[in-house]
Image (tube, grey):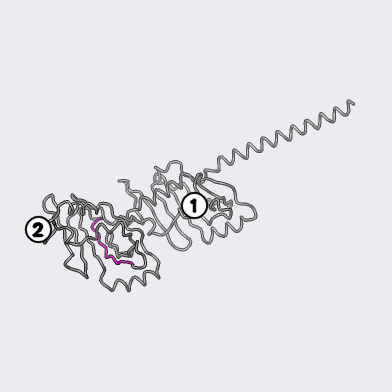
Amino acid sequence: MNRNKLILGILTLIFLALLAFYAIDQKKSKSTLNINESAFSIKDTASVDKIFIASKFGWSALLEKRNNGDWFLNNQYKVNKGQLSILLKTLYWQRIKRPVHKGEREMVIKNIATKGSKVEVYQNGKKTKVFYVGGDANDAKGTYFIMEGSENPFVVYMPNHTGFLSPRYVVKEENYRNSQIFKSNLNSFIQIKVEYPANPSESFVIVKEGNEAKILGIDNVNKTVLNNYVSAYNRIFITRFIEDVNFINKLDSMSQYPPNVSISVQDKVSEFSNSIDIYFNEKDPDGMLGIATIEGDKKYVVIQNYVFDKLILPASRFRSN
């Protein structure tokens, strides 16, 4: 009887020891996960002053913050603030969801090596994080990431975000370019010129005379309409830059014909002294095509009717009844 109790006691001690070991191991694993889950995130995004993203396909984007707080793209263009905000929020919120399963590890590493994008993050002038962004996980709940110098890829996600992270790490230059073409107002503009090649009588030029706007060649001007028109130039954005080579080749032939409308603005701020030739798009009643000259750089663009319609007015619209 005593022998049975002794055996039972020993088995109980063994069971309790195994239970304690399991609990410690789980706690250790959980602790390790908590440390690692933010390995790809940046807690202090306000200190980020440079981000470099490069694709295996040859595209790259260098985003740098200058001393005045403005961000520039590839040392040439102002950065699209909306796209920059998306990128910084992604860097802040992204978390490790799980390590890559052993069975998919080799495939994931190969995918990142051949199709992934490299991301370098600098804070206060120092490189603090370098990682690679690959394809999207098969379970549709994250994107494959791997830290530079590591052999262990992870599935990374954003809490409370539905979708993959790869679209947030766009690489092409046009995705980060500032899309605002006009930012003039009654105080800053020098001249606005609108031309209708097919109907020259409705073309017009607005100039600054003293502190007021004046439209040349029209005496009985509706001042309210004129002032509201000039003010409409304050926030005018293109929808996107066109970089598809095949599409550009088609647009080259279109550009041989006169545009439906040409708009050019001279402003006290040189970066908003821009112009655009607009071609109506019969295949897309909600959108138009344009050849925009922004900061001296000529690009094919897509624009929306609801944005530019308020600028496409005939000269007769400014006359008082």
Q: Look at label 1 and name its amino acid.
A: Leu
Residue lying at 67% horizontally and 35% vertically, measured from the top left: 23
Determine which of the numbered discs, if any, sits on residue 165 in the image.
Answer: 1
Pick the front one: 204 or 168: 204
Disc 1: CA contacts within 10 A as few (<14), some (14-19) or many (>=20): many
Disc 2: CA contacts within 10 A as few (<14), some (14-19) or many (>=20): few
Region in magenta: 272-281
Residue 259 x %, y %: 26, 69
Q: Main secondary structure of the magenta part?
A: strand
Report if residue 273 lies within the magenta region. Answer: yes
Q: Which residue is mark 2?
A: 219
**105 lies left or right of 284:** right
Query: Going by the picture, which residue comes out furthest to the front?
Result: 321
**2 lies left or right of 256:** right
Residue 193 x %, y %: 19, 61
Whole-angstrom CA distance, mark 1 to mark 2, is 57 Å
The quadrant of the rendering that contains the N terminus is top right
Query: Going by the picture, which residue comes out furthest to the left?
Result: 219
Report if residue 269 lies within the magenta region. Answer: no
Residue lying at 57% horizontally and 52% vertically, measured from the top left: 153
Q: Is residue 242 above or below residue 226?
A: below
Of labels 1 and 2, earlier in sequence is 1
Q: Look at label 2 and name its amino acid.
A: Asp
**121 lies left or right of 150:** left
Residue 209 x %, y %: 11, 53
Q: Indicate which label's residue lies in the foreground, 1 or 2.
A: 2
Residue 314 x %, y %: 20, 62
Residue lying at 28% horizontally and 55% vertically, measured from the top left: 236
Secondary structure state at the residue bearing disc 1: loop
The quadrant of the rendering that contains the C terminus is bottom left
